[in-house]
Amino acid sequence: MGIAIDGGLFSDMNSQEVAEKRKIRTAVWVSNLANVVLCAAKGYVSLRSGSVALIASTVDNLLNVVSGFILWSTAISLQKLDPRTYPARKERIRPVGVVSVASVMATIGLQSLIGSCGALVAPEYSFFLQGNRMKWVVGIVVFVTFVKSLLANYCKAFRNELLKAYAQDHVYDIIINIIGLGAAIIGHRSAWWVDHTGAILLSLYTMRLWCVKVLENVNSLVEQTAPPDYLQKLTHLCSNHHEDVRHVDTVRAYSFGYCH
């Protein structure tokens, strides 16, 4: 995802560090691949079931898949840059990609919200969890949730910040899956409006996640100032760079893509 580790990057590391980096890379690839497969399986089940709550929860699951794909593809792109053509290494390409996709996904969430609100006032509502369909829908969603719990525990075993973020994303997906499945079952068995209410809540949550993602990446594009502790470290480094340095007048640092 955010880190793409090749043999050329290991030249200044000892064997233990290299082994740890390879474990981290493997965990990232496993999480990304699992996100894609599980999201596809759940998407198929959601569409076949007709449950708008499950569909809304699948839209939320796309967050991890899309974000992972963007960061992975841009990481590969950055490794192949010609420094003479791109002296700044195209550092803004990742936030631009995330903002673009986030805008589309937020729009999808809004469309899901509008559709669910409209269905609440519809005179008729047809649900498609009939016969054995209920069993395999529940079975697949439960399986997806179980795998997500395994992935969360797997990523928590590492101290790497990126994998901690992956673990948190997996936990969020577990909660979303439980809410979506619960709303679908209740909507099928007793109160049909619960399915749409669950879809509305999940759509609002999805829109919030994507909007937060947009704001985070916009800040990295508009050259926002670096955190105070970062500036303090730079000032200290400049002040102690050479014995002839008597005074540091001004130190400025600002975001440039995901860097400063």
Image (spheres, grey):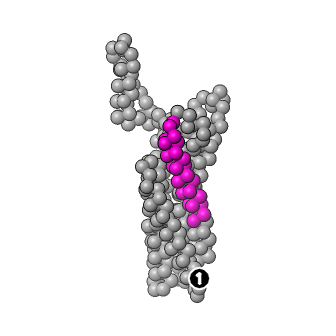
Name which residue lies at 37% across and 12% down: 244
Which of 230 and 52 lies nearest the eye of the viewer?
Answer: 230
Name which residue lies at 45% across and 83% down: 191
83 lies left or right of 116: right
Dominant secondary-structure state across the stretch colored magenta: helix
Q: Is residue 27 above or below residue 227?
A: below
Name which residue lies at 64% across and 35% down: 81
Residue sitting farthest toward the top: 244
Q: Is residue 140 above or below residue 237?
A: below
Please name the amino acid that badge 1 sits on: Arg
Residue sitting farthest toward the bottom: 131
**Residue at mark 1:** 133
Tally the numbered discs: 1
- Residue 5 locus on image (x, y percent): 57, 43
* Magenta span of residues: 13-38
Using the rendered image of the protein, determine whether residue 40 is visible from the camera's viewpoint.
Answer: yes
- Residue 168 locus on image (x, y percent): 43, 57
- Residue 38 locus on image (x, y percent): 57, 65
Using the rendered image of the protein, determine whether residue 193 is visible from the camera's viewpoint.
Answer: no
Q: Is residue 58 above or below residue 99?
A: below
Residue sitting farthest toward the front: 15
Name which residue lies at 58% across and 87% down: 131
Residue 87 position by quadrant: top right
Question: For residue 34: magenta?
Answer: yes
Question: For residue 150: magenta?
Answer: no
Disc 1, SS: helix
Tell me if mark 1 has few (under 14), some (14-19) or many (20+) residues whose alpha carbon lies within 10 angstroms of its own. some
- Residue 17 locus on image (x, y percent): 49, 41
